[in-house]
Amino acid sequence: MEKLIITVAPTGSQTTREHTPYLPLTPKEIADSVYEAWQAGASIAHIHVKDENGNNTLDLDTYREVVARIQDKCDIIINLTTAGGLFMNDEDRLKVCELEPEMATFDAGTMNFGSHVFYNTPQFLERLALKMKEHRIKPEIEIFEVGMLENTLRMAEKS
């Protein structure tokens, strides 16, 4: 059998309970969902967290609780999003690195996302790359168009 890496993203960034009543929202629900996916063969958990109203958040305490609950259950690789949602500020996005997950997302450029723009300026990406390097976090490089590949290669040359 060929080797396969399965990543689970139990909440996603845009999904709500209006889309599906089965969406895990609380730290316990997210951890339970990740554990079930791990039991089924997933090896990476791409984690977004939600607040009590089901909105995206980058709240570090919520992340800590989710991570702790997952780590209590299994040894899946944890990949925290640094995006959190379309309207998060750069400083909050960088703080995710303080939790020192094994992996974190690196959205390699600005993009249209539905009717909104998701900003990832070159200055922010440089700061994020340095922060990830400082905390020894492996990037999940998210490339949605060819220009993002160029951004990624340019950053790799710098480091």
Image (cartoon, helix red, strand yellow):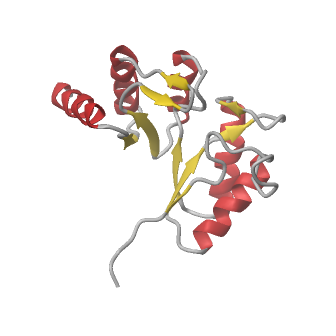
Q: Say how many tags the image has.
A: 0
Name the quarter where the N terminus is drawn: bottom left
Residue occupying image coordinates x 70% and y 55%: 31
Residue 39 place in picture, x, y as percent:
61, 73
In this view, the residue farthest toward the bottom is: 1
Q: Nearer the viewer, residue 98 or 9?
A: 9
Residue occupying image coordinates x 37% and y 39%: 144
134 versus 15 height, above or below? above
Question: Residue 106 lies in what quarter of the image?
Answer: top left
Residue 33 place in picture, x, y as percent:
70, 61
Residue 63 place in picture, x, y as percent:
66, 38
Q: Nearer the viewer, residue 90 or 143?
A: 143
Relative to 132, 98 lies left or right:
right
Residue occupying image coordinates x 41% and y 65%: 5
Residue 54 place in picture, x, y as percent:
78, 38
Question: Residue 65 lies in what quarter of the image?
Answer: top right
138 versus 153 height, above or below? below
Residue occupying image coordinates x 21% and y 28%: 159
Relative to 34, 94 lies left or right:
left
Q: Nearer the viewer, residue 17 or 125?
A: 17
Question: Residue 53 lies in what quarter of the image?
Answer: top right
In this view, the residue farthest toward the left is: 157
